[in-house]
């Protein structure tokens, strides 16, 4: 009995990359190898348009689970590698369908063949009819019927030059691009719902995402720090590693509180965060900043205030949530596994010394005037000098 299984891994967007396709495929293969670290006896090969994994039968479910965390995979299937003999393929289909008829006697099925080996004697359509006919002959008396448009069960066959794989289910993947194929970026990470989702979206676009957290332990305690470490652990399920920089922010916030207009505090906090983040990005070669800002969601995220904050940096700022509403962001945070951590009660840095009426349309000249009232350059350098650099471990997947 063959106790080996073949996982067919498909990609879609990568296939459109033309002359650069090999680079993206190689990156995806490296990410797959990393995610399967510790599983013995798994082999990988890359025929045209697919990645194939060979594993023991009892490893297949674990491979499927782990590969669900790898951006760049469009879908995958667990199948059996076999000789391209139609009777053997039909017998495999009968073996899979027969138990299903016990609970659904009116089961509808179809056969779909993809034939990349053009030298094979039969066309894809001819294989469909031949295999489907043998299955019907064996199981029609039990109620099995054909429905090409809306089958309950689809038997799929891939006939390649050096392999033929037969499989029955397609498991959707994360899609997108493989992490590491688009450079590295720095995310401004808070303990809230939005910023982890924004960083995840950049992961799915091929970026390796690192984080900076602005900490204020004297007023926030240790809780926010611990939350962010765990959020990094969740995000590290989707990439090989994330470096987190923790910047002490209390002295800057106290200075803004004591010397600047109360209404401008939150925007002034954000301007300082952006400046510090760009300094880190410039030093470490990050190509852009990533934030969880969504237009109009809170007072600091009006069009005018976003503009006022962006003016203090000259690097790219990505805001992948800018047009999303809160319910959409919450739904995505639940999907990626950050929601339960994000909603734990803990103030974020911007909520410290929050004014009663924060400005929704901060004026640039007033902000710049406020910034002459405290030594922000010196405080910024002090904060960077005290910065902590961490490499959070991924949470178990």
Image (cartoon, helix red, strand yellow):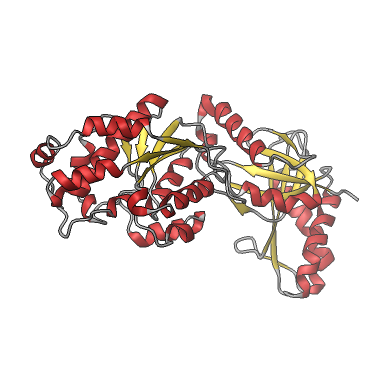
Residue 41 position within the rendered picture, expressed as x and y whole percent measured from the top left: 80, 39
* In this rendering, position of residue 209 left or right of residue 382: right
Front-most of residues 203 and 219: 219
* In this rendering, position of residue 352 left or right of residue 257: right
Name which residue lies at 39% across and 45% down: 189
Residue 188 can be seen in this image: yes
List the single residue furthest toward the front. Answer: 218
Name which residue lies at 63% across and 36% down: 49
Q: In the image, is residue 171 above or below residue 366?
A: below
Residue 320 position within the rendered picture, expressed as x and y whole percent measured from the top left: 36, 45
Front-most of residues 88 and 200: 200
Name which residue lies at 27% across and 53% down: 352
Residue 284 position within the rendered picture, expressed as x and y whole percent measured from the top left: 42, 26
Front-most of residues 41 and 237: 237
Residue 306 can be seen in this image: no
Name which residue lies at 39% across and 57% down: 329
Res 82 → quadrant: top right
Front-most of residues 183 and 214: 214
């Amino acid at each position: 009995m063959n106790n080996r299984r073949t996982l067919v891994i498909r990609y879609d967007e990568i296939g459109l990359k033309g002359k650069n396709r090999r680079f993206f495929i190689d990156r995806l293969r490296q990410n797959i190898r990393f995610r399967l670290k510790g599983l013995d006896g798994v082999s990988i090969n890359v025929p045209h348009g697919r990645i194939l994994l060979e594993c023991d039968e009892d490893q297949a479910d674990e491979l499927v689970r782990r590969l669900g965390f790898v951006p760049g995979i469009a879908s995958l299937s667990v199948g059996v590698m076999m000789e391209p003999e139609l009777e053997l393929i039909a017998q495999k289909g009968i073996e899979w369908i027969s138990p299903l008829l016990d609970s659904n006697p009116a089961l509808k099925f179809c056969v779909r063949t993809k034939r990349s080996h053009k030298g094979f004697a039969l066309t894809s359509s001819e294989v469909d009819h031949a295999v489907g006919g043998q299955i019907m002959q064996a199981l029609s008396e039990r109620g099995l019927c054909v429905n090409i448009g809306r089958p309950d069960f689809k038997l799929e066959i891939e006939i390649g030059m050096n392999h033929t794989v037969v499989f029955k289910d397609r498991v959707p993947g994360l899609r997108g691009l493989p992490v590491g194929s688009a450079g590295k970026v720095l995310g401004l990470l808070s303990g809230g719902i939005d910023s982890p989702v924004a960083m995840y979206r950049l992961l799915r676009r091929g970026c390796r995402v690192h984080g900076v957290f602005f900490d204020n332990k004297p007023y926030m305690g240790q809780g926010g720090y611990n939350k962010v470490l765990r959020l990094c652990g969740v995000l590290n399920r989707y990439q090989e590693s994330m470096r987190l920089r923790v910047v002490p922010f209390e002295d800057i916030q106290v200075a803004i509180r004591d010397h600047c207009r109360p209404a401008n505090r939150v925007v002034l906090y954000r301007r300082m965060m952006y400046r510090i983040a760009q300094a880190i990005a410039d030093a470490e070669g990050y190509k852009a900043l990533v934030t969880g800002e969504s237009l109009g969601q809170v007072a600091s995220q009006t069009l005018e205030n976003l503009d006022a904050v962006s003016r203090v940096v000259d690097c790219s700022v990505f805001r992948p949530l800018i047009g999303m509403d809160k319910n959409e962001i919450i739904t995505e945070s639940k999907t990626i596994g950050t929601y339960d951590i994000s909603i734990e009660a803990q103030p974020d840095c911007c909520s410290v010394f929050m004014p009663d009426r924060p400005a929704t349309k901060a004026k640039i000249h007033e902000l710049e005037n406020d910034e002459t009232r405290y030594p922000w350059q010196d405080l910024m350098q002090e904060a960077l000098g005290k910065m902590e650099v961490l490499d959070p471990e991924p949470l178990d997947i």
